[in-house]
Amino acid sequence: MTIFNENRTYGVELEVNTNRRSATLSNAINREFNNMGISATCTNERYNHYNNNNNNWKVVSDATVDGWEVVSPILKGFEGREQIKAVCKALNELGCTVSMQTGMHVHHNARGLTAKQVGGIFGAYSAFQTLLNYGVSQSRRGRGYGGYNGIADWGVVTNNGTDTFDRGYQNSITANSVFTGPRDGSFIGALNRKVGLRRETSISIGSSLARHGTIEFRQHQGTINATKIWTWVLITQSIIERQTQNPVKFPKPLYEEIRDGKNHAKGDYIRFKSFIGVIPRRNNNDVEASEPYCWAFRQLYKSIKKFAQQAGIADPKQIGR
């Protein structure tokens, strides 16, 4: 069973195209915060990796886009969603746009996770990579715009299914070692030796752990649509919560299970939803606790259906077979 964790902190980075000054963006965002009665602020700053612990959004330069990057502070729960709505409203009213060169990144706090949980999160995303590829635009399926959307490799992270992060840390940490934060060099170093912590993949556990103490999901295309952003926040958070609220599990990609002789009537969407465990009847019929993730999966399916049909896939529920 996996239910919405309103206490898991997160952050978002929105890359946008515009010829307006950064101060124009920050002023517009501040006005919208004020209009919506939100206790938050936005400033325009030089490019930096400072991890905000207050309520300060920032507009910074980004060499990969013809415009700016709008970076949130540490957010939490539905309050964070309201801030995202305000920011997106301001950016849309200014005429900001997105393109194939822009991305939307989501960070989730990784402090307190064990090495095995981190591995399970990476492994689960990798196992359902084929499905998630159709949850985003074609430009974010490993074609390398900005080098930020390489595909996560299930075979590498799980040693082709034989390794469940129970061993192989060269005695520096164990599977149950807990990540304490960006200065936890032994934890980060051991994971680097284990799987190689590339930054330029759809899910990054490399520089984001060292800079922010987060796991970063980098695959989503650029967007200033608050519904799409909140959907991706919840989908990626649900992957983390699946491995923290339940025993860690390393699912295999569907093609691997079929190769092993298992028969599946359903494709990856049903498998993914079942793996996460967001179906209310599996959560003691606690519909309210399950609903945020259930809603997100319904939104995800809309994107999968749209992009799969663009690729000539008539039945998106068969993806992965």
Image (cartoon, rainbow, N blue to C red):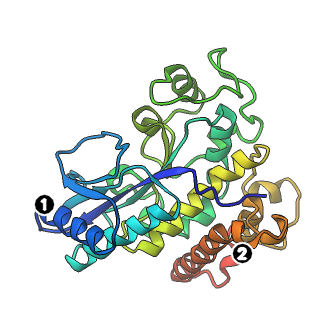
Dot 1 falls on a residue whose secondary structure is: helix
Residue 65 in sight in this render: no
Q: Nearer the viewer, residue 286 or 297?
A: 286
The 10 Å Cα crowd at callout 1, few under 14, some 14 to 19, many 20 or more, is some
Residue 204 coordinates in the image, percent (x, y) = 49, 44
Q: Is residue 52 left or right of residue 108?
A: left
Question: Residue placed at 71% from the left, 52% from the top?
Answer: 242
Image-quadrant location for residue 155: top right
Q: Is residue 47 left or right of residue 284?
A: left
The residue that disc 1 covers is: 23
Q: State how far apart marks 1 and 2 are (Cα).
A: 47 Å
Quarter of the image with the C terminus is bottom right
Q: Is residue 79 left or right of residue 162?
A: left
Image-quadrant location for residue 98: bottom left
Quarter of the image with the N terminus is bottom right
Q: Amino acid at mark 2?
A: Gln
Above or below: residue 136 compared with residue 190: below
Q: Which mark is residue 98?
A: none
Dot 2 falls on a residue whose secondary structure is: helix
Question: Residue placed at 56% from the left, 50% from the top?
Answer: 8
Question: Residue placed at 65% from the left, 78% from the top?
Answer: 316
Residue 190 coordinates in the image, percent (x, y) = 57, 23
Above or below: residue 138 compared with residue 206: below
Question: Residue placed at 77% from the left, 64% from the top?
Answer: 274
Q: Which mark is residue 318?
A: 2
The 10 Å Cα crowd at callout 2, few under 14, some 14 to 19, many 20 or more, is some
Q: Nearer the viewer, residue 321 or 109?
A: 109
Q: Earlier in the sequence, mark 1 or mark 2?
A: 1
Residue 32 in sight in this render: yes
